[in-house]
Image: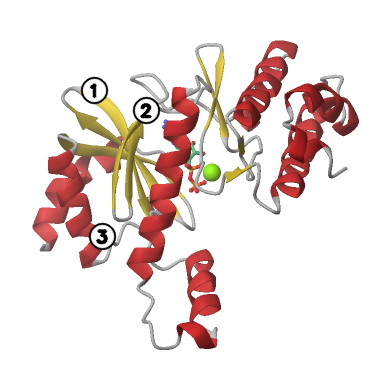
């Protein structure tokens, strides 16, 4: 795919106009396989165009996109990030795997599939998460949380209330009932929209039977309790753990 095709895909003029991100931070150079994956995802999920980048991080670029006159989110996982490089080195350094060439795209595809599967599980159990739409290679397509004007803010940019705290706690309990521990929970991965919270960034969520699940859950609770208590909500790590105990399936409870 040549550069003019990319320009059409990304509608550069709209970027310049609508994005309030520092252009220097927009690392929008995708490799050929990613562009091909985007092209395929466009036709598979009836996406008309990428509207503007909502966020560019180390591991992904998140776009608002338009599909059949509705907004959706297209999350493009970068092909050259540290996390994936580590996974690759780890596997390739293992003598058992030397003969098997581990393809970076296939590792990332697994990661994307994992985020999609987690999102679907939670969505079906009525945990507030974006609507899972589909995935292809390193591309995830999901429902857009936000208004016509702008995406929903992260919790870190919201004036938090007791109500928001309760919704967050309820969400964590519901996730546990759906057998998942978010494992990267913080005020960055929770959005606030129309008086509701939404949990996002679900690739690293693990089953409650995962050997690290208890540890991840404690870390999540630590992050969330620290955030809320710093912003004037009367809570603590111990209080949250206590509250959650009833929702924690037996196998997690016993490890304490
Ligand atoms: N479905 C969505 N609707 C609106 N904004 C989103 C959505 N998903 C992600 N975002 C925005 O993009 C940012 C990065 O997405 P996230 O899934 O957390 O990826 P990363 O791994 O880069 O942190 C989020 O913090 C949020 O601001
Ligand atoms: Mg995130």
Quadrant where the N terminus is found in the figure: bottom left
Neighbourhood count class around disc 3 (C-alpha, 10 Å): few under 14, some 14–19, many 20 upward: some
Q: Position of residue 174 (x, y in %)?
A: 62, 23
Instruction: Answer whether labels 3 and 2 touch (C-beta < 8 Å).
Output: no
Residue 19, quarter of picture: top left
Residue at mark 3: 34
Q: Earlier in the sequence, mark 3 or mark 2?
A: 3
Residue 22 visible, this angle: no
Residue 75, quarter of picture: top left
Which of 242/43 is in front?
242
Which of 177/71 is in front?
177
Q: Position of residue 201 (x, y in %)?
A: 51, 41
Neighbourhood count class around disc 2 (C-alpha, 10 Å): few under 14, some 14–19, many 20 upward: many
Describe residue 44's horizontal placement relative to residue 177 as left or right.
left
Residue pictured at 47% horizontal, 32% vertical? 121
Residue pictured at 40% horizontal, 41% vertical? 116
Distance from the alpha carbon under mark 3 to that under mark 1: 23 Å
Instruction: Answer whether labels 2 and 1 touch (C-beta < 8 Å).
Output: yes
Q: Is mark 2 within 8 Å of ligand 1?
A: yes
Residue at mark 1: 70
Q: Identify the coloring.
A: secondary structure
SS for dot 2: loop
Distance from the alpha carbon under mark 3 to that under mark 2: 21 Å
Q: Earlier in the sequence, mark 2 or mark 1?
A: 1
Residue 111, quarter of picture: bottom left
Q: Position of residue 2 (x, y in %)?
A: 10, 63
Q: Position of residue 31 (x, y in %)?
A: 26, 66
Describe residue 63's horizontal placement relative to residue 11 as left or right.
right
Residue at mark 2: 144
């Amino acid at each position: 795919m040549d550069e003019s095709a990319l320009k059409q895909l990304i509608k550069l003029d709209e970027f310049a106009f609508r994005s309030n991100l520092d252009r220097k931070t927009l690392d929008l150079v995708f490799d050929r396989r990613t562009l091909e994956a985007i092209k395929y995802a466009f036709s598979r999920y009836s996406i008309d165009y990428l509207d503007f980048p909502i966020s560019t991080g180390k591991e992904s670029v998140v776009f608002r996109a338009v599909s059949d006159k509705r907004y959706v989110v297209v999350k493009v996982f970068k092909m050259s990030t540290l996390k994936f490089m580590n996974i690759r080195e780890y596997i390739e350094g293992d003598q058992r795997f030397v003969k098997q060439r581990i393809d970076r795209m296939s590792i990332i595809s697994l990661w994307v599939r994992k985020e999609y599967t987690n999102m679907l599980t939670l969505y079906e159990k009525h945990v507030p998460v974006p609507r899972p739409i589909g995935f292809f290679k390193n591309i995830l397509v999901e429902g857009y949380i936000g208004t016509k004007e702008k995406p929903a803010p992260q919790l870190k940019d919201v004036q938090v209330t007791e109500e928001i705290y309760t919704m967050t706690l309820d969400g964590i309990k519901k996730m546990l009932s759906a057998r998942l521990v978010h494992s990267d929970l913080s005020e960055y991965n929770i959005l606030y929209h129309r008086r509701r919270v939404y949990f996002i960034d679900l690739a690293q969520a693990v089953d409650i039977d995962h050997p690290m699940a208890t540890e991840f859950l404690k870390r999540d609770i630590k992050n969330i309790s620290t955030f809320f208590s710093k912003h004037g909500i009367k809570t603590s790590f111990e209080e949250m753990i206590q509250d959650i105990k009833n929702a924690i399936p037996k196998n997690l409870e016993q490890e304490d």
